[in-house]
Each structure stands twice: as C-alpha cells, then as structure tokens.
Image (tube, rainbow, N blue to C red):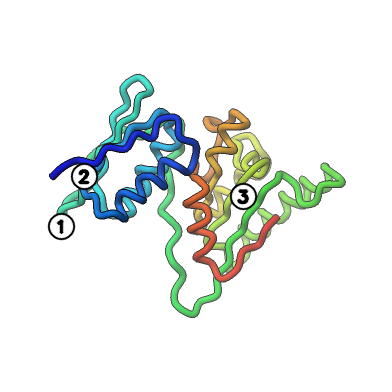
Amino acid sequence: MTMKKIDARGKPCPQPVMLTKASVDGGEKELEILLDNPVSASNVTRYLEGQGFNVLLKDDDGMLTIKASPQKPGSKPAPKPAPKPAPTPPSAAPAPASGKETFSVLITGKTIGRDDQVLGEVLMKGFLGTISQIDAAPTVLALMNDGVKLALQDSATCDHLKNLEKQGVTILVCGTCTNHFGITEQIGAGVISNMFEIIESLNKASKVITL
C-alpha cells in the first residue's frame, strides 16, 4: 500500500489538521505528515487517533514526522514521544446523548466586559469558579485570543479550569493564540488545540455561551 505523504511544514493552524482530514476522507490508510510545529503535531496526532489510526511521532531536532496506519482489531496504539511543548490532552469531547440539552462556553478575553479591567477580571474569576461548582457543567470550554491567558499556570483562574477538567469538561486552548503571545509552554490547564477542533467541539453542544 502506497503511503500518502503530506508536507504541512510552515502551514498555520488549522491547515495541518485539515490537510490530514482531507486525505483520511479520501480513503488514505497509510499517512506520513511532515511538520515543524509541536502544537500542530499534537493536533494532528489527536485527530488521527480519534479516527482509529496508530500514530508514531518522530522528532528529529524540530523536524517532526508523523506516520499513521489503521489500528488492527485488539491492538494497542504504537508508543510515541509526546510533542513538546503541548500539554497532555484530555479525552475529546463526547457527543451529547440524543435529546439531552448541553452547552459549551467560548471565551475570547480575560475579562467579562471591557470598560473596567479590574471589575472584569473579578467577574471572570467568579464566572469560572461558579460553573466549576454547578451540577450542569459545560461539555466544552474553549479559550481564544486573550482568553488563553486564563489557563496560564500562575493565573488566578487556572485552578478553576483544572476543577472543570476533573469534572469531565474539555478545555480547548487555541494554539495560534498561545503562539502569538509566546505562552504555549506556560499553559497549565486544558489542551493546546486548533480552530477546526474548537469549532467541531462547540458545534456538538445544544447552545454556546460566548464571553
């Protein structure tokens, strides 16, 4: 079987995932993807594993190569080194049970409201603290733009996000945004994600709350 080769080096998020998806949708079974971004490598790996592939990642001084092949029945995924600096991802957001109302949250800033920075930060901390304690937690909480800073290890909101993760909430942190701010290695909660995964995950919910 011929291996499909994809050169995704230099491609911005979410193009590496989209190129991989196009090949999978086209029926390709053996894939080799070249990347130069550990966040993209993490996203592509997670997507392929979700599609039932065995994935082997090789890191050759920053040149990342992913080889993927279908899992055999009863086989275990091939061992692989985790790409750096992306955090270890949680399980992908499950599809809601039929007829069950669910909600997701999209946060695009560190504050609720923009006029008063101090008040806005207090409100955001209170919001995250509250939803981490209610019974009906969101299925997905996505952080984009300045909102990714809520997941910083030394932020006042990181513990609230960790509590949500413990409850089964999928925390998706925009990798393009963390790269822009230079904070990818400082993220302490959630998984570094991409636009494709964020949109797909939010779309599974009955409604989306945007802040």
Q: Amino acid at mark 3?
A: His
User: Is residue 108 shown above or below 153?
Assistant: below
Task: Name the N-terminal-most of marks 3 and 2.
Answer: 2
Q: Are marks 3 and 2 in contact (CB under 8 Å)?
A: no
Task: Locate the N terminus by quadrant.
Answer: top left
Q: Which residue is mark 3?
A: 160
Q: Residues within 10 Å of mark 1 (few under 14, many from 20)?
A: few
Labels 1, 3: front one: 1
Q: Which residue is mark 1?
A: 73
Of residues 20 and 206, the one nearer the viewer is 20
Residue 30: mark in rendering = 2
Of residues 31 and 197, the one nearer the viewer is 31
Across and down, in percent, residue 210 comes to: 67, 58
Task: Locate the C terminus by quadrant.
Answer: bottom right
Q: Amino acid at mark 1?
A: Pro
Q: Residue at x 25, y 42 (%)?
A: 31
Q: Residue at x 73, y 53 (%)?
A: 126
User: Is residue 86 shown above or below 69?
Assistant: above
Labels 1, 2: front one: 2
SS label for mark 2: loop
SS label for mark 1: loop
Across and down, in percent, residue 128 comes to: 66, 54
Q: Give the Cα distance between marks 3 and 2.
A: 41 Å
